[in-house]
Amino acid sequence: MPRFATLTSFMPATPEARPPGSTAVGILTILCSLAGWTSIPLFLKHFAGEIDPYTANGWRYAFSALLWLPPLILAWRRGSLPPGVWRAALWPAFFNIIAQHAFGIAPYKMDPGLMTFALRAQVIFVTIGAAVMFAAERRVIKTPAYLTGLFMVLGGTVLTLWLRPGGIHGEVGIGAVWAIIAGAGYAAYALSVRKLMHGMNPLLAFAAVSQYTAIALVGVMLIAGKDHGATAWHLPNTQFTLLMLSAVIGIGFGHTCYFLAIQRLGLAVANAVVQLQPITVSLASMMIFGEKLTTVQWVTGTIAIAGAGLILWAQSRTAARPPAP
């Protein structure tokens, strides 16, 4: 994701002192994270004519889980593995499985750019969940800036989908539903991470979640994938390499760079840059797959992104102020 709420959920809501280091490094890492997460919908769309989504999901996440396994083993041997991390990761992994499954199917039904705009619905689900689960979040949600941003996200997302030439129906409509389900899953994932894994080392916690997620998605591939996922073996060497590379870039490299960027730049700046993902995906999809958004769709999509940015600003501004007595 394109999941700007994922690693953020490990972090406290109040500002923290940042480790010493160059801001240039932070800018480089957040741009690398944005590039990595931009590539994933494009990779999945590329493989839509080669392998089914269950096979793509299973292979990608299995390879990613292998990449995240060594840090877990090393932390276990050093005795630095967070206590209770495997139990705490169960619910976040459950929601991540749903989100990843839906996210993997959506590009098979619709163009990547439109799909990533639909994923902005995640902000709405996060707001609802945060208001129910965390009393402290209600102080932020009630601010005029937050509510304005929320309506901008909702209205901009709905209009971007609704104003698609030819309408939203058939396969595209199914894809939009899968994208919204993915957004809801990522929101539930972020909320459960904050509730159950807050304060844990984010990379180790995410690595634990990845192991559970890989087991489930490989299981789905073995049951529902064409030839039980064996079709990936028949891909040309270059295509199979791209499939594995998509796991490295999106699930491994993207998250690592995002965490480093948060340390260097802070949450607000890092999250604001990640909000540009729908634009970068749409531009890349236009050049690679010929996807076209109308001028009105660009306007409404930009409104949705600006609304997400306004929400982040409201969160940062409210968190910086002490609560009223």
Image: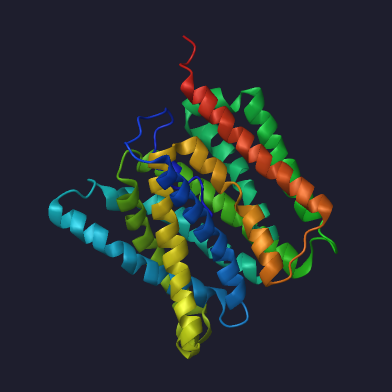
Q: Residue at x 48, y 34 (%)?
A: 133
Left or right of residue 42, residue 213 in this image? left
Find residue 234 and report its horizontal and vertical position in percent: 48, 90
Q: Residue furthest left?
A: 78
Q: Residue at x 63, y 33 (%)?
A: 310
Find residue 125 and report its horizontal and vertical position in percent: 59, 43
Q: Kindly indicate the quadrant of the structure image that contains residue 70.
A: bottom left
Left or right of residue 117, residue 100 in this image? left
Find residue 250 and report its horizontal and vertical position in percent: 47, 62
Left or right of residue 220, residue 70 in this image? left
Q: Kindly indicate the quadrant of the structure image that contains residue 64.
A: bottom left
Is residue 160 among what the camera can see?
yes
Front residue of 275/69: it is: 275
Is residue 1 among what the camera can see?
no
- Give the total of numbered labels: 0
Front residue of 298/172: it is: 298
Front residue of 261/102: it is: 261
Q: Residue at x 68, y 60 (%)?
A: 283
Q: Residue at x 45, y 64 (%)?
A: 249
Q: Is residue 133 above or below residue 75?
A: above
Q: Is residue 87 above or below residue 241?
A: above
Find residue 170 and report its horizontal and vertical position in percent: 77, 68
